[in-house]
Image (tube, helix red, strand yellow):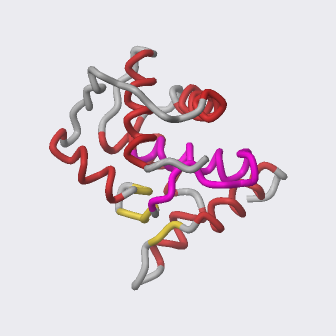
Amino acid sequence: MTYSALEVARYIIHHEAQQGRTVSNLRLQKLLYFVQAKFVVDGHDASPCFYEKMEAWGFGPVVREVYYEYRYYGGAMIPPDRNFSTSITPQDQSMIDEMLDGCAQFSTSALVDITHSQTPWQEARRNPYNKEITLNSVYHYFRGTRNGES
C-alpha cells in the first residue's frame, strides 16, 4: 500500500517520540528517504511507501510537501500529534520501524553525510533542470550495495 508522505512523516514522528527520540525537519527528511528505500527494495511488489517525489537539496533528500508542513519548527524538535492515528498497516509499520531503529544509531549530520555519499542524491544534484531523486535510482543503488557493489 502506498501512503501520503505526510502520513508517513506523522507516523515517523510518533514512533520516534515513543522511543524517546526527537525528530527535526532535517532528520525527518533523511528518515523518509531511508524508509522509501526500504520499501522500494524490500517491500511487497517493490512499491514505494509514499507517492510524493524526493528532491536532492543541499542537505540531502527532501520531500517538499513534508518540508513545508514542518518548516515552522526550523531545526527544533517536531512534537508528535496528540491525537495520533494512522491508516498504515501493521506490516508496513513494522518495515518503517525496522528502518527507523536502524537509523537511530546515527546523528542527523551523519545521515546527511551518508545521503551525500550515495549515488541517487549525487546524480540528482548534478541535473541542472530536475533535482528529483527517482525511485529507480534508489532501487538500483540499494540493490547494488546489498549485493556488494557500490
- Pick whichever, 64 or 47, lies toward us: 47
Is-magenta flag for residue 44? Answer: yes
Q: Residue at x 45, y 46 (%)?
A: 30
The single residue placed furthest to the left in the displayed view is 72
Q: Residue at x 39, y 56 (%)?
A: 62
Figure check: 124 above or below 85: below
127 horizontally vs 23: left or right: right
Figure check: 6 above or below 107: below
Figure check: 144 above or below 131: above
Q: Position of residue 54 (x, y in %)?
A: 45, 61
- Pick whichever, 60 or 72, lies toward us: 72
Q: Position of residue 93 (x, y in %)?
A: 58, 30
Is-magenta flag for residue 121? Answer: no
75 horizontally vs 46: left or right: left
Check the picture and name the quadrant holding the C terminus. Answer: bottom right
State the count of labels.
Answer: 0
The single residue placed furthest to the bottom in the displayed view is 129
Q: Residue at x 50, y 32 (%)?
A: 106
Q: Is residue 102 visible?
A: no
Most frequent secondary structure within the magenta stretch: helix
106 horizontally vs 42: left or right: left
Q: Position of residue 38 (x, y in %)?
A: 65, 45
The magenta region covers: 29-52
